[in-house]
């Protein structure tokens, strides 16, 4: 973008509609936003029919050479993966074993095994992250303390919340289906919103779809309003939807 904004340039394309978009008075809101985005650049469009646009076709196609790999060498270089993943107590963790230590026959010898701890990457939130959030939030700590105490004075609270694996869950009246949402502090909402809306795997869904995705897993006070305001203020959604 910095290179294109610095001066005028020529755009060769087989999309003739782009020339119309520059001149038309759009009444459609989406087309208007597209025209405004293109209006930030100083360029001239030159139409090239698709059959003549060989340069663009070459850029979008990976060259394929002759197959020079013989089947015997390919078979000799295929090995079993050295990592074995297991699902343990609903948390993503695993055990890795060195395949070289496995003996033949009916017995299996393992020379080295170790636990692979789950970690948060690419915006994912682990159960350990949630535990730390809850332990550092005074409001959540107070609810956990009341639920852990004796007596019936907090009976209504017990109808709204449940503790599972030392993590506070909001009872969404579907505990039988395992759909109660994990309680998170409101100040951590931005992390979840970026994961469920902005992330490339989420692809910027509408606020209702984003809300349903988060609601099935998490809960915080005022969640519906927070999600709606966040999605409505999303710059990417405003430009392309």
Image (cartoon, rainbow, N blue to C red):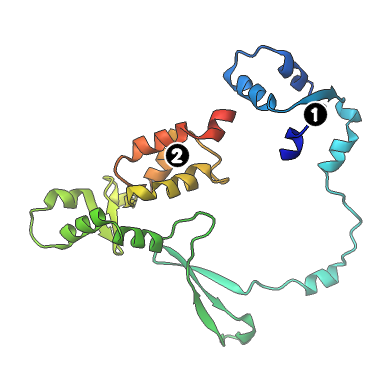
**Residue 241 seen by the camera:** no
Q: Which residue lies at the image location 26% right of the left edge and 45% below the top edge?
A: 173
Q: Under tag 2, what secondary structure?
A: helix
Marks 1 and 2 sit apart, C-alpha to C-alpha, by: 40 Å
Nearest the viewer among 22 and 208 is 22
The residue closer to the viewer here, 56 or 106, is 56
Vertical order, 25 against 4 (above or below): above
* Residue 212 relative to residue 102: left or right: left
According to the image, label 1 marks what residue? 8
Q: Is residue 176 visible?
A: yes
Q: Is residue 173 above or below residue 84?
A: above
Crowding at dot 2, Cα within 10 Å, few <14 / some 14-19 / many 20+, comes out as many
- Compared to 79, does 19 lie above or below? above
Residue 172 coordinates in the image, percent (x, y): 28, 45
Locate residue 229, reporting x and y percent.
41, 34
In contact (CB < 8 Å): disc 1 and disc 2? no
Residue at the image point whose x is 50% and y is 71% from the top: 94
Which label lies toward us, 1 or 2? Answer: 1
């Amino acid at each position: 973008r910095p290179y294109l904004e610095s001066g005028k340039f020529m755009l060769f394309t087989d999309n003739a509609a782009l020339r119309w978009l520059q001149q038309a008075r759009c009444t459609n809101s989406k087309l208007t936003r597209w025209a405004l985005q293109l209006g930030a650049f100083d360029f001239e469009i030159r139409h090239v029919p698709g059959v003549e646009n060989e340069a663009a076709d070459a850029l979008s196609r990976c060259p394929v050479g002759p197959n020079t790999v013989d089947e015997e060498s390919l078979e000799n270089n295929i090995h079993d993966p050295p990592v074995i993943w297991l699902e343990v107590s609903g948390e993503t963790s695993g055990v890795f074993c060195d395949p070289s230590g496995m003996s033949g026959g009916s017995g299996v010898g393992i020379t080295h095994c170790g636990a692979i701890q789950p970690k948060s990457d690419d915006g994912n939130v682990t159960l350990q992250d949630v535990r730390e959030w809850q332990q550092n939030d005074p409001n959540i700590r107070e609810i956990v303390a009341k639920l852990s105490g004796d007596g019936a004075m907090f009976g209504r609270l017990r109808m709204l919340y449940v503790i599972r694996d030392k993590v506070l869950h909001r009872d969404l009246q579907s505990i039988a289906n395992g759909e109660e949402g994990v309680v998170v502090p409101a100040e951590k909402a931005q992390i979840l919103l970026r994961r469920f809306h902005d992330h490339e795997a989420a692809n910027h869904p509408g606020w209702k779809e984003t809300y349903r995705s988060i609601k099935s897993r998490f809960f915080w006070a005022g969640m519906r309003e927070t999600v709606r305001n966040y999605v409505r203020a999303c710059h990417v959604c405003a430009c392309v939807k």
